Amino acid sequence: MSNIAQAFAHGKAFIPFLTCGDPDLATTAACVRACADAGASLIELGIPFSDPTAEGPVIQGANLRALTGGVTTDKIFDLVRELRRDVTVPMVFMTYANVVFSYGIDKFLSKAAQVGMDGLILPDVPFEEKEEFAPACRKYGLDLISLIAPTSEGRIARIAKAAEGFVYCVSSLGVTGVRSEITTDVGAMVRLVKEANPAIPCAVGFGISTPEQARRMAYLSDGAIVGSAIVKLLAQYGKDAPEHVGAYAKSMTEALRG
């Protein structure tokens, strides 16, 4: 069983997302540890990019702050290497194809595996184009996570059959961001995935911010992914954010497993 599959083996998974380097890498490291201590099942680390097309204003702002602060992909690899001294929770990178391309696909993935990452999410790479990255991911033992959206309909079964690690179910059309209510029929999306590939876990992301929303989405799936709500805490508290992020993560894991 891959490390990522393991993340779903102990009940509903809480998956926090952090933008690396917002406001600085020391704060990112402290937030990762706070999330791990609070019981996060898997942690997504965002590698900042100048044109993050899937992101709403909250995460766009975090990307800008991190890049302005001088974060580079190499510094993020060093961060992960340091975190892996004591953090055992599975971790995946979320970034854009261009970041991986410009670094060199093989070089990027070999280094990601070497520092202890477990997988990769590329929201701007459609399923039909994933073979550009999949062979190198397989070569280095990284899961390339597939996304499905409310518009994926006819392709969901195909995506699910080829999925590795888990399937990222995008709960809303549009970009990431906190939403007061999620109206997509997430249950129907998850059912289609499970019919095609009963063994693959499904986690729901985009728009989840409250413990109640997380509980509702996890009831329909295997876990909840939260990004913008956490990134908002970083924007609000800066270097003092880790204790707030830890408390938030604890409220989410309790909601999902209570």
Image (cartoon, rainbow, N blue to C red):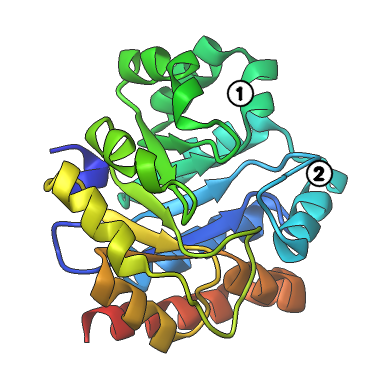
Quadrant position of residue 197: top left
> Which sits in the foreground, 111 or 153?
153
Residue 183: image location, x then y, percent: 48, 77
Report x, y in % for residue 18: 57, 57
Q: Can the viewer see residue 47?
A: yes
At 52% across and 32% down in the image, what residue appears? 126
The quadrant in which the C terminus is found is bottom left
* Local SS, label 1: helix
Residue 46 versus residue 250 in the image, above or below:
above
Is 230 in front, or is 180? 180
Rendered view: 94 above or below 43 = above
Q: Which residue is mark 1?
A: 100
Residue 117 in sight here: no
Badge 2 marks a residue whose secondary structure is helix
186 on left or right of 82: left
Residue 46: give x, y in percent of width and height.
59, 47
Residue visible at 38% across and 20% down?
Answer: 137
Disc assigned to residue 67: 2
Q: Is residue 168 above or below residue 12?
A: above
Under mark 1, the amino acid is: Val
Identify which amino acid the numbered label 2 is placed on: Leu
Q: Residues within 10 Å of mark 2 (few under 14, many from 20)?
A: many
Residue 226 placement, left or right of 140:
right
Q: Report the disc number at residue 204.
A: none
Between the residue at mark 2 and the residue at mark 1, the CA separation in whole angstroms equals: 16 Å
Image point 68% across, 25% down: which residue?
98
The quadrant where residue 187 appears? bottom left
When asked about the image quadrant of residue 24, the answer is: bottom right
**Residue nearest the viewer, comparing 115 with 52:** 52
For the N terminus, the quadrant is top left
Q: Residue furthest front?
A: 154
